[in-house]
Image (cartoon, helix red, strand yellow):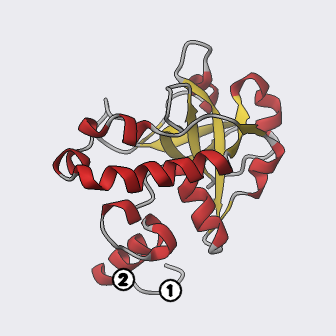
Amino acid sequence: VKLKKNDFESFVAELQKIRYRDGIRNQYPSRLHYFSEWILNNNTRGIVSGLDNQNGVKSDKAINYMSTHPLDYPVLKEHPELIPSIAQQEKELTKTGFMYFPKSNIANLYKYLQHGDIIALTSTIDGVDVNHVGIIILKGNEFHMLHAPLSGKKVLVSDGPITDFLKPQSKNSGIMIARPVF
């Protein structure tokens, strides 16, 4: 929309620009598989801002799920020679870490959210940074999430506020924010 182009080829070019490391598609490892890295890479290139995350806390979590569970990924299962490259990327991502808002401090998080923000639900699962991603929608005085849940098989706005995704029993540890730059 910003480029005033609505043809399929332009869409594919923009998708490649945001989905691959530095916008360059070069085999499976060039894809931004972890959302925390997606935010970092797209923030560096001025596509999104991740600055509000600096008001959260730094994760010291090891990110390594893909390299430690390669059979869960058809490409890695078929091409195990790619696993060392993925493992190196995970090592770098772990070293960099990521900032997020823990679910134990929702009041702090709410101060930084805006309608239209991309949010990532951070994970308690070993080796994983993010469980799910959506877009913040302000309904009344509450933040809801526009997302595509596995169970719904379609894009929808959550019935309840985003705090429903952050209940103590959930596998979500908190939220990261990515704000599109226009």
Label 1 crowd bin: few (<14), some (14–19), many (20+), radius 10 Å: few
Query: Which quadrant of the structure image shows residue 10?
Result: bottom left
Q: Amino acid at mark 2?
A: Ser
- What percent of the width, then of the height, locates residue 109? 76, 37
- What percent of the width, then of the height, locates residue 113? 73, 46
User: Which residue is denoted by mark 1 in the rendering?
Assistant: 3
Q: Amino acid at mark 1?
A: Leu
Checking the image for residue 10, the label placed there is: 2
Label 2 crowd bin: few (<14), some (14–19), many (20+), radius 10 Å: some
Disc 1 to disc 2: CB gap under 8 Å: yes
Is residue 117 depicted above or below 104 in this figure?
below
Residue 85 visible in image: yes
Checking the image for residue 117, the label placed there is: none
Query: Which quadrant of the structure image shows residue 156?
Result: top left
- What percent of the width, then of the height, locates residue 96? 67, 51
Residue 36 visible in image: no
